[in-house]
Structures are given as structure tokens and as C-alpha cells.
Image: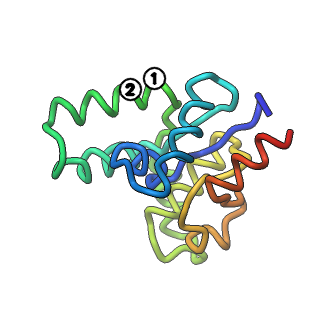
Amino acid sequence: MKGMAVLLDTNVPLDSFFDREPFRENAQKILTLCRERKCKGFVAAHSLTNIFYILRKNWTTAKRKELLLDLCDIVQVAGIDRIKLVEALQNEDFDDIEDGLQVECAAAVNADYIITRDMRDFENSPIPGILPEDFLKLFDGE
């Protein structure tokens, strides 16, 4: 499992940052696995800007930057370029451009899974979506 690569959907770090129950514990366990390099964790670049924006209600700019810098120490960032953007826009399997970009970024880093709580968003994804709790069970089972 150490070589497994996963892309974290935006909701996973947010569950940790906002202490969302009952999702917080699984999100934190996944982030710990990434921090300890037991799996290769990635977030899409656009997730960082989305997270920064969403956190604005609860934290100052300085604190949001600190949280994202810490996240960048834990996971790698999958970049977005023109090719990924065009592919996501042209992909008729995804009505939501954000989900299409997640898939493009996951494919670019050869992710084994997209860890998400929104499985429906990735039903048509060539990179399978997996719930945080199912990923942790799979990880523990290996």
C-alpha cells in the first residue's frame, strides 16, 4: 500500500479543518497516512483555492494560509494546465467542471483512487472514487 497514490477530493481536507462530524476522524486518519508517507497523497491545485475561499468564514487570511501550507507539507499538488482544463470541459461524463478537473488531476498523477464523500460525482470516472471509510478499510486490510 505504500506505493498507492490517492487524490483527495476537496471535502476530505475540509472535513478535517472544520471538524465535521462524523467525518473528521476518517479525514484526519487519511491525512496522517499521507503525512507519514504510507500512501502518496495529492490534492488538485484548484482544491487549494476552493478551500482557501471556503475557510474565510472561520479563519483569518493568515490562518488560512497556514492551514494550506501545512496541507502542502502533507500532500503533493496536482497542477492544472490548459490541456487538463480543455479535457475536463470536453468530457461529457461530467457536468461539474470541478469534478472533471479532479479526474484529470487524478489521472495525471496515476492515482489509484479519488477519496471523496461524493461518490455520485465520480460514477463515470476512469479513476474510481472511494469513500474515506472504505479506503481506510482497504488500507488496513493490505
> SS class of the residue under badge 2?
helix
Q: Viewed as shown, does residue 39 lie left or right of 89?
A: right
Real-space Cα separation, disc 2 to disc 1, in angstroms: 5 Å
Label 2, on which residue? 70
Q: Which mark is residue 73?
A: 1
Relative height, residue 82 to residue 109 (above, below): below
Query: Could you tell me residue 39's position as x and y percent?
Result: 68, 32
Q: Are marks 2 and 1 in contact (CB under 8 Å)?
A: yes
Residue at figure coordinates x 15%, y 36% from the top left: 61
| Front-most of residues 73 and 97 | 73
Q: How is the image coloured?
A: rainbow
Q: Amino acid at mark 1?
A: Asp
Q: Quadrant of the N terminus?
A: top right
Q: Name the one closer to the observer, 2 or 142.
A: 142
Residue at 76 percent across and 28 percent down: it is 2
Residue at the image position 45 percent from the left and 55 percent from the top: 11
Q: Is residue 77 above or below residue 119?
A: above
Q: Is residue 54 above or below residue 31?
A: below
Sort mark 1 into few (<14), some (14-19) or many (20+) by Cα contacts within 10 Å: few
Residue 7 image offset from top left, x and y in percent: 59, 45
Mark 2 is surrounded, within 10 Å at the Cα level, by few (under 14), some (14 to 19) or many (20 or more) other residues, namely: few
